[in-house]
Image (spheres, rainbow, N blue to C red):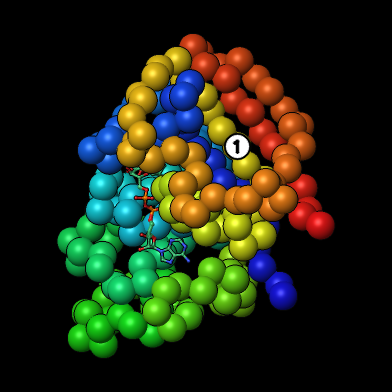
């Protein structure tokens, strides 16, 4: 199976949470880390999030630095990477910021259970990929993205999509910025939620970079193959 090079970037609190128990976005990164994230977006062919993140945060996922936008255009690319949403039932609002802000292609990945009426509406603002019957088949979706020329894919969460990608063996590297705050709460999303691995299945990582940044630390890991 041919798929893009995939990395997840996430910001978490010192206790591993990525937002509050009300699923409210928290500013975990400082300006330095936000700029690093912007550079990662600008250097990617596509940036992908789950529908939970769109509902909770309404992100635009655009490249913020004008200099990087210009550099992308000079390289013959669109100002922004392709923005991709994993959304089994096509719940994404048509007025989501992903559609309203910035230039560039958008892709919504749905399953066979999405309503055809909603898909017709979405076709005006995005390309639709159908993968899976009731729930998006992420492995099949990755193959489709690769076929459309996406070779480097940045995943920006949230917790459930991170689990889906990791547990299906679809991630090459993980970058976590750990900020100087505690969010707490047993229902606050963590970096990886979902079902969780059993002891035998636990995923191992290889740390290849650690850098103190502002009041936190950036860790970069390679995902080791599971045996
Ligand atoms: N601090 C950070 O770096 C970030 C924090 N967040 C936070 O994460 C939270 C959202 O996370 P979640 O609610 O977990 O939503 P999510 O963004 O992970 O989306 C999950 C949804 O994607 C859909 N999906 C379809 N097929 C799937 C599959 N095969 N595997 C997994 N998901 C699939 C499902 O509808 C699922 O509910 C928000 O509170 C947001 O603020 C989100 C991104 C980055
Ligand atoms: N890197 C990072 N640090 C934080 O502190 C964050 N809260 C996030 N959140 C992610 O950024 C998205 C918002 O993107 P736009 O500014 O709208 O382009 C948000 O949805 C999370 O994915 N990231």
The answer to which of 14 and 8 lies nearer the viewer is 14
Q: Identify the residue at the far right of this view.
A: 227
In this rendering, would 115 be left or right of 199? Answer: left
Q: Quadrant of the C terminus?
A: bottom right
User: Could you tell me which residue is drawn at 72 percent across and 75 percent down?
Assistant: 1
User: Could you tell me which residue is drawn at 45 percent across and 73 percent down?
Assistant: 136
Q: Would residue 50 be visible to someone looking at this image?
A: yes
The answer to which of 19 and 3 lies nearer the viewer is 19
In this rendering, would 123 be left or right of 159? Answer: left
Percent coordinates x, y for residue 175 in the rendering: 60, 37
Q: Residues within 10 Å of mark 1 (few under 14, many from 20)?
A: some
User: Could you tell me which residue is drawn at 56 percent across and 46 percent down?
Assistant: 8
Percent coordinates x, y for residue 149 in the rendering: 60, 71
User: Could you tell me which residue is drawn at 57 percent across and 20 percent down?
Assistant: 217
Mark 1 Cβ and ligand 2 under 8 Å apart: no
Q: Tell me the residue that label 1 is attached to.
A: 175
Give the answer, above or below, for where 68 lies relative to 148. Answer: above
The answer to which of 19 and 46 lies nearer the viewer is 19
Give the answer, above or below, for where 188 lies relative to 146. Answer: above
Q: Would residue 156 be visible to someone looking at this image?
A: no
Percent coordinates x, y for residue 38 in the rendering: 48, 38
Give the answer, above or below, for where 192 lies relative to 133. Answer: above
């Amino acid at each position: 199976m041919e798929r893009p090079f995939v990395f997840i970037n996430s910001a978490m609190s010192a206790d591993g949470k990525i937002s509050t128990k009300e699923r409210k976005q928290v500013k975990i990164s400082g300006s330095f880390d936000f700029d690093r994230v912007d550079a990662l977006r600008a250097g990617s062919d596509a940036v992908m999030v789950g529908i939970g993140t769109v509902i909770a945060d309404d992100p635009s996922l655009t490249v913020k630095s004008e200099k990087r936008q210009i550099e992308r255009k000079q390289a013959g690319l669109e100002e922004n990477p392709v923005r991709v949403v994993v959304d089994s039932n096509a719940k994404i609002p048509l007025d989501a910021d992903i559609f309203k802000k910035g230039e560039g292609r958008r892709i919504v990945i749905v399953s066979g259970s999405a309503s055809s009426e909603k898909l017709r509406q979405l076709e005006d603002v995005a390309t639709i990929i159908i993968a899976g019957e009731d729930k998006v088949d992420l492995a099949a979706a990755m193959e489709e993205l690769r076929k459309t020329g996406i070779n480097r894919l940045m995943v920006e969460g949230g917790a459930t999509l991170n689990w889906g990608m990791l547990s299906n063996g679809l991630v090459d590297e993980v970058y976590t910025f750990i900020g100087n705050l505690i969010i707490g709460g047993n229902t606050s999303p963590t970096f990886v939620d979902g079902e969780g691995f059993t002891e035998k299945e636990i995923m191992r990582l290889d740390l290849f970079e650690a850098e103190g940044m502002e009041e936190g630390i950036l860790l970069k890991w390679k995902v080791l193959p599971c045996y």
